[in-house]
Image (spheres, rainbow, N blue to C red):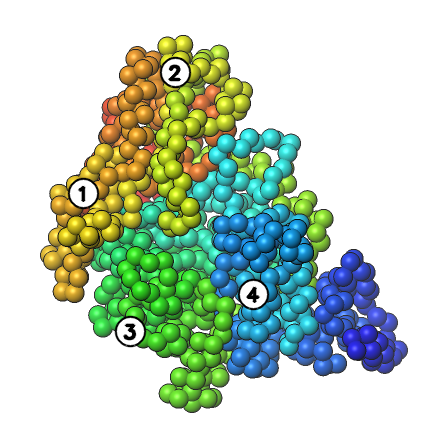
Amino acid sequence: MKLISRNLFAILSIVVMAGCQPKWSETQKGDVVLVCNEGGQTLGYSIKSGVMILTVDGFGFKDLNQNGKLDTYEDWRLDANERAADLAAKMSIAQIAGLMLYSGHQLIPGGGFFGITTYGGKPFDESGSKPSDLTDQQIAFLTDDNLRHVLVTRVQSPEVAAIWNNNAQSLVEGIGHGIPVNNSSDPRHGTVSDAEYNMGGGGNISMWPGSLGLAATFDPTIVRRFGEIASIEYRALGFTTALSPQIDLATEPRWNRVRGTFGENPHLSADMARAYVDGFQSSGTSGWGNESVNAMVKHWPGGGPGEGGRDAHFGYGTYAVYPGNNLADQLKPFTEGAFKLVGGTGTASALMPYYTISYNQGNENENVANAYSSLLIKDLLRGEYGYDGVICTDWIVTGDVASIDEFKGKPWGTEEWSVAERHYRIIMAGGDQFGGSNVAGSVMEAYNIGVEEHGEEFMRERFETSAIRLLKNIFRTGLFENPYLDVESSKETVGNPEFMTAGFEAQLKSIVLLKNQGNILPMDKSKTVYIPKRFTPEHRGFFGFGNLIPEKLEFPTNLELVQKYFDVTDNPAEADFALVFIESPESGVGYSKENLESGGNGYVPISLQYLPYKAEFARDPSIAGGSPFENFTNRSYKEHSVKTSNSKDLKLVIDTKKKMGNKPVVVLLKMANPTVMAEFEKYAQAILVNFDVQHQSIFEILAGNTEPSALLPLQMPANMRTVEEQNEDVPQDMTCFIDSEGNTYDFGFGLNWSGIINDERTTTYLKK
């Protein structure tokens, strides 16, 4: 039938074209046919999908709904708004409901969440499947539920990712209106710490410092360049949406997602957010195009002020609190950054609210999670700030949850509502899409609730409004024209040497020199170094899941790499200096079953020091300015204690100093959160702070091949008392640590070989 249909359309095309010279030509590679229009768009379609090419005015157009005529949404000469409105009007409610889904985490190839070597529980060589095959689940949600937004967490290789993308696009191209799949990814440009950079070599993907590291450069042009390169690599992997950047203001130093932010200064964060989104969304130097990647900024209105530093992935971290009455600063990275782009795309195309209940921000009677809040979404975001991009919930906010510490649904403040009612409330508050949902049933139920309350015409219009927003992001990235990838091009693009070099250079500019007593750095390459082994504390994977990884003692870096810079010894007596690798204190999540079982309320402090900590100075939640929840639950951790899992890092520094005597000890701190430096600073002659970089970049600085230039994007607290007394919602309100050299470890502090850095960057950001 498809062959007959193809020939029929070819005849029709010739008839329409009588007396007119065609302005397009075809080439085929594998199953994909490319249509080149003179002076117009290049189209791509799969011979498996049944889609044909129509000729109108001499140009070629994809007949995506296979009705033999050119529909408005199929006309690439028209703008995205007009095309999206036309298609939305043609879609059924069930099709729109599918468009409002955002899949749960997908692996390519399919398999368990923490493995990518199996298909349906079997090794690929036993299952008969290829790594690039779609799983049965993926086929089901693409066909049965009309889902078109897929979150991909891991890929085996660029080649596998490209083939999988082509398979998925071929499947959906022949269904209904031929709406392409909008694949997306969380950030994936992190580093492998012991990997060696080779100027002439490539890698799996370019490696860049973490978000705090990018912020530490104090240079938005670096972040813009990151966005440009990352977007090229994303497109080569088949991703047209980035679930980033995370632009929450890190005003609460204990929050476990501080490392994913651009720091605590609202003006620096706004500039970095703008640069990041411009880099991803602008196609070259212009606006939207087939090189663009949608940026989904997160998390409105800012997840930084988590009560006591607790995170809202769990019920014990439900609330964002505002003892300083400072919602305004939390909004600035959005309103002054991501919403005010200098590139041609204008504003971030998508946005994600956080899980938290932003307590008493507006109507006291609407203390519900942000995605449900008509005050924060409909009135403030949509109304006051005029944001008309896609609003997608964070993952699984509509699901049920059984207990306060289970990683399941996160419907904070709406626990008594049904799942369908939660979907309905989010839609009516101004939301468009549901993160982590593969099944359209609850969205359809929400539609029916709305029909009962407002009538079918009202709800049809409301659903079309969301459909238009969602479709525009697919149209503007060129997917309707050509969603297919050239596999060889993908392999050559991702992690190519040019991109790897740019990432490594950014790492060099992200490392902060905090102390350099007696100018011991840079260190002469003729010196011999002692690097003690480090205990890696017992831990689990992402958010406490995965197999328990036992504590182990191991050499903390790549020995062969170190030997390219210095001689290495395992005898401190033979060494000229020592390098001690440590990480920020890890004290847990602020909630303890052991505390609960022993008669407490379960709440414990989150500590930023290595030594055991008792919260003697914690704010009383029953007083003004505290956390105002004493009427229904006791969430106070005052007088409760906590230990740090990596306390041996402190012991490692102290013991190394004893072994080295008067010889210098250099501490290399991998920082995830502000850290109480007073515990170890006096034992170190030099301190370098990094934010998730390759160790080689640190050695480049140690050896003097590169001069340090980065600045602190966060304050370093003098002690835990100032951490407890600061306000979760107020930036830069701690008493900062002063070291033995008289330097204050405040926002914007950093050293180079000449001393304290004072340049255009500090002038720009320290005055604000």
Q: Quadrant for residue 686, please give it.
A: top left
Q: Mark 4: which secondary structure? A: helix
Residue appearing at x 72%, y 48% in the figure: 488
CB-based contact (under 8 Å), mark 1 and mark 4: no
Circle 1 packing at 10 Å, graded few (<14), some (14-19), many (20+), is: some
Disc ID at residue 641: 1
CB-based contact (under 8 Å), mark 1 and mark 3: no
Amino acid bearing label 4: Gln
Q: Is residue 700 left or right of residue 257?
A: right
**Residue identifier under label 3:** 416
- Earlier-in-chain disc, 1 versus 4: 4
Observer able to see residue 429: no
**Residue identifier under label 4:** 137
**Residue identifier under label 2:** 577
Q: Is residue 171 left or right of residue 707?
A: right
Q: For marks 3 and 2, give the one nearer the viewer.
A: 3
- Earlier-in-chain disc, 2 versus 4: 4
